[in-house]
């Protein structure tokens, strides 16, 4: 067990260091922060923002006490961040294994004593940690905005919504990691992962159709369960679904590398 965690930590540190020393990763983070910050300011402070709408309602003598601005903001903002993340995540996952193939180090990993699961899990934890670091400044901005709300906004809803965003990100990154293990082209891996993201959107659209088919597909939709989290609804079925996608991505990645190991033996 000690060897397992030691190997996992070594892969995790190596992967995380590769992101924090990559100029391209900083460009992705800068774009994410810029667009995320614009979303935040626009939703709250634009002429058609939530604060302006409540102010206009007060001036017109319309009671706005029942309008929960922090809650409405969190729902809108997290859904926008989720949509933005679906475009950013493929660019983070595209090099997880494709770069290893290009540099010729994937064969070393495939034939090393490390198990494929340890390598895949370490890589996934590294990229998820980097995405968490990207998300942290925006979370701080949200907390600053919530600090002035009256009454005090429930912290549980805030953390549950962001936990849903992290689970969504981990699910997409796990599947993107598998796609990255299939090709040495990072561009191709990114395009294929974008295609997967589009497929997820199509699945979400089909799930809104009435009838048993739409209901059955709705249980497989990442976006539907993510929306539940953003609304402060904790559903164990959603948690199980996210974990299932993560495990599926890890399993497929391990099998892909195992195939390469068999070809090299």
Image (cartoon, helix red, strand yellow):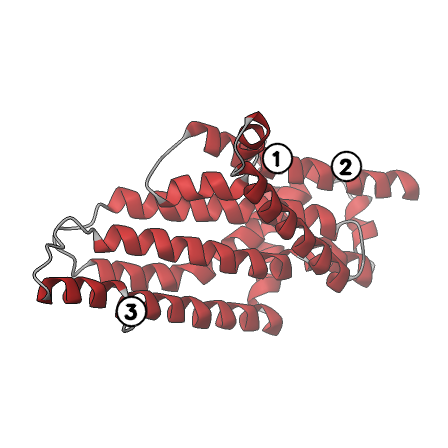
Label 2 CA crowd tier, 10 Å (few <14, some 14–19, many 20+): some
Count of numbered labels shown in the rendering: 3
Residue 9 has which mark?
Answer: none
Q: Are marks 1 and 3 in contact (CB under 8 Å)?
A: no
Structural distance between the alpha carbons of marks 1 and 2:
12 Å
Structural distance between the alpha carbons of marks 1 and 3:
42 Å
Label 3 CA crowd tier, 10 Å (few <14, some 14–19, many 20+): few
Helix, strand or loop status at disc 3: loop
Q: Quadrant of residue 205?
A: top right
Q: Position of residue 195 (x, y in %)?
A: 69, 53
Q: Position of residue 85 (x, y in %)?
A: 52, 57
Helix, strand or loop status at disc 2: helix
Instruction: Name the front one of labels 1 and 3.
Output: 3
Q: Are marks 3 and 2 in contact (CB under 8 Å)?
A: no
Residue where numbered disc 2 is placed: 255
Q: Position of residue 10 (x, y in %)?
A: 61, 49
Helix, strand or loop status at disc 1: helix
Disc with the residue nearer the chain's start (3 vs 2): 3
Residue where numbered disc 1 is placed: 247
As drawn, 168 above or below 24 = above
Residue at the image point whose x is 29% and y is 72% from the top:
46
**Between 208 and 111, the one nearer to me in the picture:** 208
As drawn, 106 above or below 239 = below
Instruction: Name the front one of labels 3 and 2.
Output: 3
Disc with the residue nearer the chain's start (1 vs 3): 3
Residue at the image point whose x is 53% and y is 29% from the top:
215
Residue 220 horizontal side relative to residue 250, left or right: left
Residue where numbered disc 3 is placed: 48
């Amino acid at each position: 067990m000690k060897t397992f965690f030691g190997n996992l930590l070594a892969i995790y540190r190596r992967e995380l260091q590769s992101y924090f020393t990559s100029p391209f990763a900083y460009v992705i983070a800068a774009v994410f922060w810029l667009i995320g910050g614009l979303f935040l300011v626009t939703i709250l402070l634009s002429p058609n923002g939530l604060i302006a709408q409540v102010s206009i309602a007060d001036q017109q003598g319309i009671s706005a006490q029942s309008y929960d601005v922090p809650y409405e903001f969190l729902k809108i903002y997290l859904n926008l961040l989720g949509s933005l993340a679906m475009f950013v995540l493929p660019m983070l996952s595209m090099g997880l294994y494709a770069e290893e193939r290009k540099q010729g180090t994937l064969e070393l990993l495939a034939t090393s004593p490390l198990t494929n699961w340890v390598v895949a899990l370490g890589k996934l934890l590294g990229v998820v940690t980097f995405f968490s670091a990207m998300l942290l400044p925006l979370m701080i901005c949200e907390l600053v905005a919530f600090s002035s709300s009256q009454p005090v906004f429930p912290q549980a809803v805030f953390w549950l919504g962001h936990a849903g965003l992290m689970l969504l990100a981990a699910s997409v990154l796990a599947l993107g990691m598998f796609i990255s293990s299939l090709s040495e082209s990072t561009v191709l891996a990114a395009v294929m992962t974008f295609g997967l993201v589009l497929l997820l959107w199509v699945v979400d659209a089909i799930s809104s159709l009435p009838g048993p088919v739409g209901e059955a597909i709705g249980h497989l939709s990442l976006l539907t369960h993510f929306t539940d989290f953003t609304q402060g609804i904790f559903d164990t079925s959603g948690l199980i679904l996210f974990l299932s996608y993560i495990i599926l991505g890890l399993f497929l990645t391990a099998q892909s590398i195992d195939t390469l190991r068999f070809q090299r033996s």
